[in-house]
Amino acid sequence: MRLRRARSADIGRYDYLDRFRLDAELRETRQGSTRYVVCLEKVNLAGGERRAWQELEQLEGKALSVQGKRMSEHVNAKLRETEFFFQKLVSESEKVVTPEPEAFLYYLNTFLVAGESVRYLLEGKGYDWREWGTEEERGFLTFMNEQRSLVVHDEGGAETEVDWVFVPFVELRDRPSHPAYGFHVFAPPGTDPGGIGRRTYFFKIDGKDESVIECCKRYLTLVETLVGEFTRPAG
């Protein structure tokens, strides 16, 4: 039996990757010519790559969805914190006698920091303070942000002015409370019942005195509008 070395087929790497030749042949001779045909299966590399990219995009979409959900949760948590301190502000402003005279200012400082945290978080959802709202609204939000900067970076507190408002005792007497507490006036008929002073705080805006409570109420309304607009589900 005479064997002869088979001649290798001329298959280049471009034939394998691009052309996928189906007619490549390997020859082996045993007392004659015998052919073995090697058939290469064509693989759709382009389709596989496309599917891989699609799966990757789906994973990225899910990750962004989770990230967006967490961002919205953080925004809503900060909004609730802002609303909480606003209610504390209102409650403290109605007190005539308080064991902590600076409590109102403490609540104001925390309210401003919480509110600006909401706006900062919303920047990650497309909010741009330089473009949103009317010119007057942007100016007002800028003023409130400056007050927050005073709290955090400069003065340690917002720049407010205080005035005293006279409150007659007869007005305080009508407030619901236990009889052992509150103000009680005993005097002959026709006598001036007198009263007590209550602190009232103001911001100076464009040379005008603006009530801190009214400014904070307006500020909270704008922040709530922002949250509703930029955390609204798409579609």
Image (cartoon, helix red, strand yellow):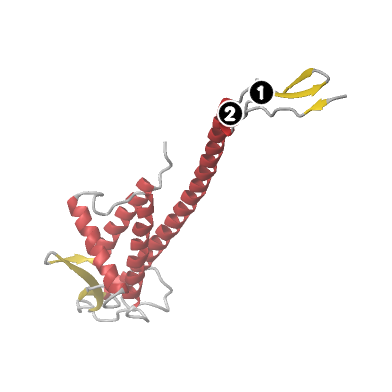
Query: Which quadrant of the structure image shows residue 211?
Result: bottom left
Q: Where is 208 relative to 14, above or below? A: below
Q: Position of residue 162 (x, y in %)?
A: 21, 75
The answer to whether one can see residue 50 in this image is yes
The answer to whether one can see residue 90 in this image is no
The answer to whether mark 1 and mark 2 are in CB contact below 8 A is yes
- Name the residue at 36% across, 70% down: 110
- The Cα–Cα distance between marks 1 and 2, rounded to whole angstroms, is 10 Å
Which type of secondary structure does the marked residue at label 2 adopt? helix
Q: Where is 139 relative to 168, above or below? A: above
Left or right: 198 as drawn, with respect to 43: left
Taking the view exactly as shown, the residue that stands out farthest to the front is 2
Q: Position of residue 56 (x, y in %)?
A: 54, 41
- Name the residue at 21% across, 59% down: 140
Which type of secondary structure does the marked residue at label 1 adopt? loop
| Mark 1: amino acid | Ala
Disc 2: which residue:
15
Q: Quadrant of the N terminus?
A: top right
Dot label at residue 156: none
| Mark 2: amino acid | Asp
Q: Residues within 10 Å of mark 1 (few under 14, many from 20)?
A: some
Taking the view exactly as shown, the residue that stands out farthest to the right is 1
Query: Which quadrant of the structure image shows residue 235?
Result: top left
In terms of sequence position, does the residue under pointer 1 or pointer 2 come before the other? 2
- Name the residue at 32% across, 70% down: 108
- Name the residue at 66% across, 27% down: 9
Dot label at residue 24: 1
The residue closer to the viewer here, 117 or 99, is 117
Q: Where is 136 relative to 216, above or below? A: above
Q: Residues within 10 Å of mark 2 (few under 14, many from 20)?
A: few
The residue closer to the viewer here, 204 or 5, is 5
